[in-house]
Image (cartoon, rainbow, N blue to C red):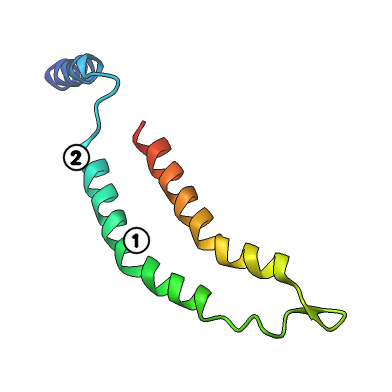
Amino acid sequence: MVEFEKRYEERKKRKRKRKKGAIDVSTIIAIAIGVIVMAILLPVAFDQFYEANTANWTINGQQDTKVVNIWYLLPFFIVLALLIAIVKMVS
């Protein structure tokens, strides 16, 4: 039992010695997989956004251009949010 406790204390000391800003290998792998998945799925999502039929989005018989313009900006904000999330996760 004493040997186990010594090894446990040594492991705790080694963990404390690690740099605070260091990233684990598992985190790097998770980020890489996330980037690959986003690279595959984001173009499909963008196509769906841009292929949406906005011709019938009207107010009092006239097309609501403000909402349509914001609709086309949504993919930009999605990418921006994903980049911010990745930066926060890494730092």
* Residue drawn at (26%, 56%) of the image: 33
Residue at 21% from the left image edge and 19% from the top image edge? 18
- In percent of the image, x 45 and y 42: which residue is there? 84
Q: Quadrant of residue 56?
A: bottom right
Mark 2 residue element: helix
For label 1, the SS is helix
Q: CA distance from mark 1 to mark 2?
A: 20 Å
| Frontmost residue, 56 versus 19 | 56
What is the three-letter code of the residue carrying label 2? Val
Residue 17 drawn above or below residue 29: above
Quadrant where the C terminus sits is top left
Q: Is 18 left, or right, of 55 in this rendering? A: left
Does residue 31 appear left or right of residue 88 in this picture?
left
Compared with residue 51, is residue 70 higher up or lower down, i.e. above or below? Answer: above
25 relative to 76, above or below: above
Q: Which residue is at 27% across, 49% downward?
A: 30
Residue 74, located in which quarter of the rendered image? bottom right
Of tags 1 and 2, the one toward the viewer is 1
Q: Which mark is residue 38?
A: 1
Marked residue nearer the N-terminal end (1 or 2): 2
Work out whether residue 58 or residue 19 is closer to the camera in this orientation and state it: 58
- Residue at the outermost right position: 60
Q: Amino acid at mark 1?
A: Met
Number of marks in the rendered image: 2
Residue 52 placement, left or right of 23: right
**Circle 2 is placed at which residue position?**
25
Residue 90, percent from left and from top: 34, 36
Percent across and percent down for residue 19 are 23, 18
Q: Specify the farthest residue to the left.
A: 3
Residue 2 disc label: none
Crowd around label 2: few <14 · some 14–19 · many ≥20 (10 Å): few
Location of the N terminus by quadrant is: top left
